[in-house]
Image (spheres, rainbow, N blue to C red):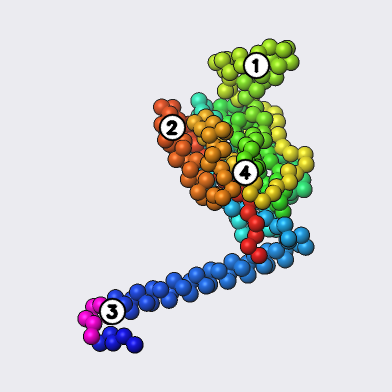
Amino acid sequence: MPDFTLLPDQTVLLIEIAAALFVTAFLSFIYVSLTTILSLVRLKKIAGNDTDDLLVCDVAYFHCKGKRENQEDAVYISPLEDSFTNGVVAACSDGMGGLLYGEVVSRYVVERLSHLYPMNFDDPDGISEEIKKISSEVYEQYRLGAGATLVMTHILKNKMNFFSVGDSNIILVRKGRVTLLNHKQNYVSLLIRKLSESGSNTSEAYKNSRAKALIDFVGNIETNVMHTSKPIQLYEDDIIIISTDGVTDAVSLNKLKGMLLPEFSAQHMARLMKSAVRNKRLPKQDNFSAIVIKMDRSII
């Protein structure tokens, strides 16, 4: 056994402090591990009998200011401790550039959504109507003088509903394939549809000076909320991105593909995306925000 009496008093004190810190850290680790396991066991009982294939949401986000004077993006993530009973709701709202009060409206949108939680997963039409009410409230306040986009997902027991107004993004990455799930409600989409119907070259749509102008948004007179009529089945290693267009305007979906890999955690993917946008150094970089959700196998 070591004879600590031969060591200087200061060294002995440091050893005792180090030992105490180690024991504290070890006990904390045991406590957190046991708490997590017990919580998952309890949540799986709540979730029902279909626990063999039960997936959990690994969630991370970033929320960054670009070259604009104000941060007009806002994000919302529902309490993760309620995920097995009420699902995970994740939303991004982007205040419309060029109009006043964009940051006020986007914050108002996500705040109102937070008050709607928990939401009825089996009633996407009802949730859509609630979003329309929020839009009407914004219209009554600003009379088309302000608005915002909205993209939102609701994930419960391996299934997902989504809701979209405007031109922000809902992206699904599955087995290396990147899919933009929502149809963007901007003028270029309208032009593409018209050119396609007439048999013309759709590339002309992108040359139009009004291509990025929104044709629908939260705060419009009669907002059209796009949403799933039937939930999307999710699988292990699926990755969902909910983001404002400041992300995809800087980094293409093809470039994002290399950062969204199933072996990465949601936090690591969010870090890579954030760095990729910043490294672009666009002179007119919009505010950029995203929520990353990875579907993971439960450890229980």
Q: Look at the numbered disc 4 and give the secondary structure of its residue.
A: strand
Q: Quadrant of residue 106?
A: top right
Q: CA distance from mark 3 to mark 1?
A: 75 Å
Going from N to C along the chain, the mark reached first, 3 or 1, is 3
Disc 4 crowd, CA 10 A, few/some/many (<14, 14-19, 20+):
many
Left or right relative to 122: residue 288:
left
Residue visible at 50% across and 37% down? Answer: 288
Residue 13 badge:
3
Number of callouts: 4
Residue 57 percent location from the top left of the image: 62, 53
> In which quadrant is the N terminus drawn?
bottom left
The reply to whether dot 1 and dot 2 touch (C-beta < 8 Å) is no
Q: Examine the rendering and report whether any part of residue 130 can be seen.
A: no
Q: CA distance from mark 1 to mark 4?
A: 28 Å
**Callout 2, which amino acid?**
Lys
Going from N to C along the chain, the mark reached first, 4 or 3, is 3
Residue 41 percent location from the top left of the image: 67, 67
Going from N to C along the chain, the mark reached first, 4 or 2, is 4
Name the residue beneath numbered marker 2.
280
Disc 2 crowd, CA 10 A, few/some/many (<14, 14-19, 20+):
few
Residue visible at 58% across and 71% down? Answer: 34
Residue visible at 54% across and 37% down? Answer: 256
The magenta region covers: 6-12
Q: CA distance from mark 4 to mark 2?
A: 23 Å
> Toward the viewer: 9 or 288?
9
Residue 42 percent location from the top left of the image: 68, 67
Vertically, is 221 above or below 295? above
